[in-house]
Image (tube, rainbow, N blue to C red):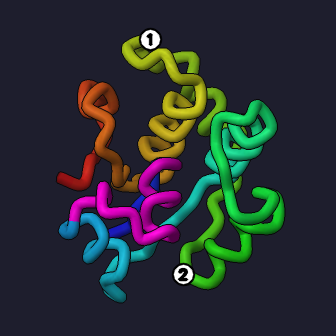
Amino acid sequence: MKLLLDTHIFLWYISGDERLPVDKRESIRNPDNEAYLSVVSLWETIIKYQLGKLPLPEPPESYLPTQRERHQIASLILDEASVAHLATLPPIHRGPFDRMLICQAIVCGLTIVTVDDVIQKYPVAILK
């Protein structure tokens, strides 16, 4: 299975946060699955860090790529097809970063790993 980690899932995973459900942690670790982190999540994290809303042990522009590589999570670029798909996405979710992750998951055939209930209202595969 190809997994797209929602931003909070990635942050919980790399920090060992107990809010990450065990089944989701095991799915990310499972060598039969491919885990991806979108550059959109890096973008979101940098903005929240700069606004003082997200403390991190190091600056996000170096910390996140290092952690992504350390945990063998692939980087997912933001492609034109995913951005164009945004025009067809119903405005159910208000978060622009989450909306783009949804588009990427749909266009790239990925399963989103999230605990965000609103994302489940979209026609996208969700790791349950």
Tag 1 or tag 2, which sits nearer the N-term? 2
Residue at the top extreme, as displayed: 91
Question: Residue 17: x, y in percent?
Answer: 39, 63
> Which residue corresponds to mark 2?
71
Q: Is residue 6 above or below residue 89?
A: below
Question: In the picture, residue 65 is in which quadrant?
Answer: bottom right
Residue range corresponding to the magenta coloring: 7-21
The residue depicted at 62 percent of the width and 47 percent of the height is 41
Say which residue label 1 marks: 91
Is residue 78 at all visible to an observer of this figure?
no
45 displayed left or right of 36: right
Instruction: Give the percent coordinates (x, y) of residue 28.
Output: 36, 73
Q: Amino acid at mark 1?
A: Pro
Q: Which quarter of the image is occupied by the N terminus? A: bottom left
Q: Residue at x 41, y 53 (%)?
A: 109
In the picture, measured across the screen, residue 55 lies left or right of residue 36, that is right
11 inside magenta stretch: yes
Q: Examine the image and state in which quarter residue 56 appears.
A: bottom right
Q: Nearer the viewer, mark 2 or mark 1?
A: 2
- From this view, report whether residue 74 is shown above or below residue 98: below
Q: Which mark is residue 99?
A: none
Which residue appears at 82% of the width and 67% of the height?
62
Q: Nearer the viewer, residue 46 or 32?
A: 46
The answer, for residue 121, to whether it is visible in the render is: yes
Instruction: Write the residue at 63% across / 59% down.
Output: 76
Which residue is outermost to the bottom? 31
Mark 1 secondary-structure assignment = loop
Secondary structure under the numbered disc 2 in the rendered image: loop
